[in-house]
Image (tube, coloured by chain):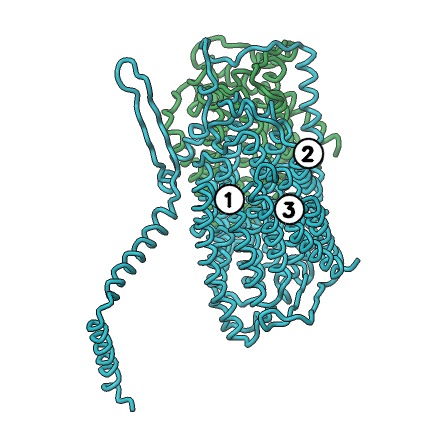
Amino acid sequence: MTPGALLLFAAAAILLGLVSAWRAPRLWLIATIASAAAALGAAIRILVGGGDAEWRLPLSIGGELLRLRLDGLSAFFLALLALLGGAATLYAREYWTDEAHPRSAPTGRAWWNLLLAGMGFVLLTTNGLHFLLGWELFTVSAYFLITLERQRREARAAGWLYLAASHASMVCLFAFFASLAAQTGSWELGPMRERTELAPLFWLALVGFGIKAGVFPLHVWLPSAHANAPSHVSAILSGVALKLGIYGLMRFSGWLPLPHAAAWTVAALGVVSAVLGVAFALGQHDLKRLLAYHSVENVGIILIGLGFAMVAAESGHPAWGALAFAGALLHVWNHGLFKGLLFLGAGSVLHATGTREMSRLGGLWRSMPWTAGLFVLGAAAISGLPPLNGFVSEWLIFLGLFDAVTLRGPSAWAAVPAAVLLGVTGALALACFVKVCGVVFLGQPRTDAALHAHECGWRMRAPMLLLGALCVAIGMGPAFVWPAISRAALAWWPEGPMTAGLPLPAALLTLGVWNSALVALGALAAMALWLRVDRNGIRHAATWGCAYAAPTPRMQYTAGSFAGIITGWFAWALRPRREIDPPAGIFPRRASHEVAARETVLEAIVEPVGRAVQAGAIALRRLQHGRLQAYILYIVVGLAALALLVFPGGAP
Amino acid sequence: MALDILVRLAVWVLFAPILPGIINKVKAWVAGRQGPPLLQLYFDLARLWRKGVVLSTAVSAAHVAGPAIAWVALLASALLLPLGPAHGGLAFRGDVFLFVSLLAVARFSMSLAALDTGSAFEGMGAARDVSYAILAEAAIIAALLTLAVQSGSASLATMLVPSAGAGSALLAAGLFAVLLAENCRVPFDDPNTHLELTMIHEVMVLDHSGPPLAVILHGASMKLLLFSVVLAETVLPIGELRPLPAVAALAASVLAIAGGVGLVESIMARLAFRRVPLLLTTAFLLCLFALLAAWRGGGA
């Protein structure tokens, strides 16, 4: 089948799913997964096959003819959308059942299909107006999915914040596409690098897409939205919806002329997002909020790659720029895979225990071995550890940065701090995920809820297994995904320095062999050691606690104390809120110590500005009081002011 | 080539446990004691390998798999390093990040194995380990950038061949501090004490016994040798010498480094806890200044 036929089938199937969402959940499941499979097929056909596919339909929306195109870059993102969308659809069937959520499950399925369809449409369209329509469609569907549990106050607040931030982004994008259309005379999008007068528009795109992608100071909506949405929604939001912001930045940084500082700004935003994203993640106690902050971090890593690729493209060093761009692209896929896996894993923890609070969990590996194992796999992948996929993309970005440094020149000055901070980010992410895995899955259960947890069923397990397997597969055979990266990179910057194609770095093959060997040797060593332990004989005893006779699970190290050293270093940014109730008297009965990181950007910048605007508006409202005499006075004063303006000017 | 790899494997696995023995001998000599035999760690390892295991009732498979994976990761990162004349075979462009990340793998799996027991002591040790590693990682990357600028390469086998040139002294000081921190020696940690007073490494392995403990101790000695080799080859142009002098120079410098660690341990006390980040930041700055020196100094 041609990509066109596959996409047509995908569109029909997702509509069928939409129609059957209320009455026939089983049909919905089959149709939506079939749609995802067809879209994945179309994307793969484009990525491994030859040229781009383009369709002009005799159908007009908003007065513009419908024109769709699937090129390397959009196919790259469409593949991720289809894969994660399909996996999360199956997961949702068990996670958000009609029995448990009789009211929200059917509408949730309908919004889900609209979300997927909207995102797919954004990737396919080449018309600015249609882009905005698709963008608004998926933004609004995501709002209804985030607030699916709207009886909870936090879910409503998170949805409201999300909606406000998304529409701030929408305003920027509307201004961006409208000015673009006004200056070019058409809503059609395409490469227009030669029109240098369009360069300043990139700043609008950066803010608009940056809010959606969750770049550091613009991420305010992201933590609460991801934490309060149902987990399959968090997975798709973090895995794909944020990536559409990245898609927009990649698309328009390749198509439009760039202002001089754009590349440096993107790289700097990337570094800031990476380091501060993970620092805020370390301060979180809520499992899903923590994962959400890691999205900020990983978007930062992607932007480091993209920013340096833009720097390279401007200064004419395509070799290391291509490595950085390839790393950024691969990290888009990788982050989708492992973050999807982690959110689905967090969802099954929430499903089994009813809490996202890490200090109430512990020892879950006993009751949830599959979830625990797969979550630890995802944690190792997101920490950039070999032999998994996150390591491969960070390796590509690192190699690009090192090459930039060895060539010296102006970009090297920026590459040194970027390389050091990228390394620091990796070490911080490792610390954070050791904390998560250790506190949630290892040790002793801290509460009854954790003690009586249960493993999830196969519909929730299979998507996690699929994503985990892909994390390992990309780590072991990175050369196999290279053709897709090369195709997407070619589509990024048409007629640019990369038209010759990205040669497969020979080292990537060696890296794949190393990773495969490490998988085999690690498994072998663990097995050999276990056999030896088994042969020597095992005795079981309580954990050594300095001979303390009555240890309780509450005496275990908590998430807050584990991260305490690092959050102390970042106290200037986290501004932790402490509530200490010290033990008092000779026989103290109660004491407590609570530390929580704040939403610094939201509380220190967004809210004060919002309050100032509100105060100004309230002050202005006094002018409107309903007294006619005063209104006539306003008119007279206004006319007099106008007359004063006009007469000295000598106008007719 | 296969022989070359086998020789290196043998060197790493067989010679690593002698380093702690040398350090202990130096410490004993400074204190005027006889000290344990040079090969004490070998005896310990052999005994532990035969012993039974006491497992905590809290632990999962990570408790045993963690040390095994950490050992494999440490051995693999060691094999990436050139050993005097023996280099090549396993080297490739960009292996330097594999090296750094493999050290991180070891840290990840050991920390999980520690947290697995649910003991507050081990949680404390793991927290300190992963926290200080962040600063050490910054220093290591700055040092590697220096070598990359100096040699114009991103592969350890070529990066470590020439001497680090202008910034050698700075780099040596910075990397020595990182060596002490990463291997949990005084002034960052005290390998002789136990429980929370030991701060990092010893407290993380409180509940390990028998063969897993043997694997951990052997891995730790490999890590010590690994950092000593990196330090020696960074400062001295060992790869440029002919084979025999190269081996002699490498062995002598590793011995000297072990002696240095022993001396530091004899004459210094452990740092106050809040000073540790300060010292590691100093190490990072030293490596960064070495980078600037290499940049100014020209090089390849």
Say which mark, if any, is on residue A458: 2
Mark 3 is on which residue type? Answer: Leu
Amino acid type for the residue under numbered disc 2: Trp
Q: Is residue B101 visible?
A: no
Q: Is residue A58 above or below residue B171?
A: below
Question: Residue A468 appears at what percent x and percent y?
Answer: 66, 38
Colour cyan maps to chain: A
Q: Is residue A319 above or below residue A512?
A: below
**Subunit of label 3:** A
Mark 3, other Cα within 10 Å: few <14 / some 14–19 / many ≥20:
many
User: Which residue appears at 60% of the width and 57% of the height?
Assistant: A118
Residue receiving disc 3:
A84
**Distance of label 2 from label 3 (alpha carbons):** 17 Å
Whether pointer 1 and pointer 2 mark residues with C-beta atoms closer than 8 Å, the reply is no
Which residue appears farthest toward the right when viewing the image?
A1
Which chain gets the green colouring? B
With respect to residue B193, does B142 lie above or below? below
Residue at left offset 64%, top offset 40%: A91
Mark 2 near mark 3, Cβ–Cβ under 8 Å? no
Q: Percent position (x, y) of residue A179?
A: 49, 71
Evaluate whether label 1 is on the same chain as label 3.
Answer: yes
Q: With A612 as the anchor, is A466 left or right in this view?
A: right
Distance between the Cα atoms at labels 1 and 3? 16 Å
Res A226 label? 1
Residue B33 on image: x %, y %: 46, 9
Secondary structure found at label 3: helix
Res A24 visible: yes
